[in-house]
């Protein structure tokens, strides 16, 4: 009788364990089902939103919560498992890569998907047409603080600082929070130069983007004896000095919703979405037309 009693307990324990394991497997998301959070800086919110919306339209059983926060804070959320995916634009420091290795314990594999840029802008009626790399650096050392960024910890500030091999704390600048706020309020600050992301104004048919383009002049960047405008060709060959490549990082160790979204964004459908946003797709697909 005792043997039968212990046998029943053992069977019950195995059944409970199998049931629990089955439940855990059911709770794991899949590329076409589940819910995750993605963190993105406001500077490239537009393209990320477009990709998320398209993905959820293709897979109605998915829910992707897009959290907009400064690039550095988004990366911290990835490390702390508060976000499954983060959008980045700058190179990580060695310290950050070590933190990624320790907390995420996955190979550091950036999934590149678009070429964006940092723009230096002035009001439309400004006589200024271009600015050199040397002039930008000089202004960032000046107490006049003529250059306006969209905030500390922002992707734009981090990228420009990295370009000049400086820490953001070593630069002198003014702040107006938010790319769109910088663009809209710039006219109130005579002689100032705003710094915004290309994605803020790149969407060809977006009403807000069209409005901002009508109010702003994007300065050409002079480097050496040449001046560079922000064009898709200059982004493609990265000749525009402040071109940056947007990429995803994930802490997802299996092929779930996070990796499914990343794969979609880097393949043809996602790259078409990037192109419609006015940015340069990182993965270029040739379109062949056969004539009969």
Image: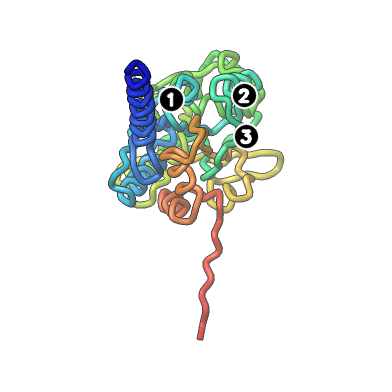
Which of discs 2 and 3 lies nearer the camera? The answer is 2
Discs 2, 1 touching: Cβ within 8 Å: no
Give the distance between the C-alpha atoms of the residues marked 2 and 3, in whole angstroms: 32 Å
The image's mark for residue 97 is 2
Quick one: label 2 or label 1, which is nearer the N terminus? Answer: 2
Quick one: label 2 or label 3, which is nearer the N terminus? Answer: 2
Position of residue 164 measured from the top left corner of the image (x, y, whole percent) = 65, 26
Determine whether the residue tagged by mark 3 lies in a helix, strand or loop: strand
Discs 2, 3 touching: Cβ within 8 Å: no
> Circle 3 sits on which residue?
132
Determine whether the residue tagged by mark 2 lies in a helix, strand or loop: helix
Which of discs 1 and 3 lies nearer the camera? The answer is 1
Q: Residue at x 64, y 45 (%)?
A: 239
Seen in the image, is 228 located left or right of residue 20? right
* Callout 3 crowding tier (Cα within 10 Å): few <14, some 14–19, many ≥20: some
Relative height, residue 79 to residue 112 (above, below): above
């Amino acid at each position: 009788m005792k043997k039968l009693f212990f046998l029943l307990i053992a069977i019950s324990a195995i059944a409970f364990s199998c049931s629990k394991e089955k439940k855990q497997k059911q709770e794991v998301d899949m590329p076409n089902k589940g819910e995750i959070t993605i963190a993105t800086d406001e500077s490239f919110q537009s393209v990320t939103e477009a990709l998320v919306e398209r993905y959820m339209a293709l897979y109605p059983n998915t829910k992707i919560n897009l959290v907009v926060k400064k690039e550095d804070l988004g990366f911290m959320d990835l490390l702390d498992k508060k976000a499954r995916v983060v959008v980045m634009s700058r190179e990580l420091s060695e310290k950050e890569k070590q933190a990624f290795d320790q907390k995420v314990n996955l190979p550091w594999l950036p999934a590149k998907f678009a070429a964006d840029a940092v723009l230096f802008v002035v009001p439309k009626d400004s006589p200024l047409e271009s600015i050199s790399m040397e002039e930008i650096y000089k202004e960032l050392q000046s107490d006049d603080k003529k250059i306006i960024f969209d905030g500390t910890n922002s992707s734009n500030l981090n990228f420009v600082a990295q370009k000049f091999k400086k820490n953001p704390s070593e630069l002198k600048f003014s702040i107006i929070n938010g790319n769109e706020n910088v663009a809209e309020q710039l006219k109130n600050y005579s002689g100032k130069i705003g710094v915004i992301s290309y994605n803020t104004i790149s969407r060809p048919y977006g009403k807000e983007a069209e409005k901002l383009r009508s109010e702003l002049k994007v300065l050409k960047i002079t480097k050496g004896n040449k001046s560079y405008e922000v064009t898709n060709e200059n982004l493609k060959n990265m000749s525009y000095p402040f071109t940056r490549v947007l990429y995803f990082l994930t802490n997802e160790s299996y092929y779930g919703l996070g990796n499914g979204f990343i794969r979609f964004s880097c393949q043809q459908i996602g790259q078409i979405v990037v192109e419609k946003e006015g940015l340069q797709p990182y993965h270029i697909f040739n379109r062949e037309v056969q004539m009969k």
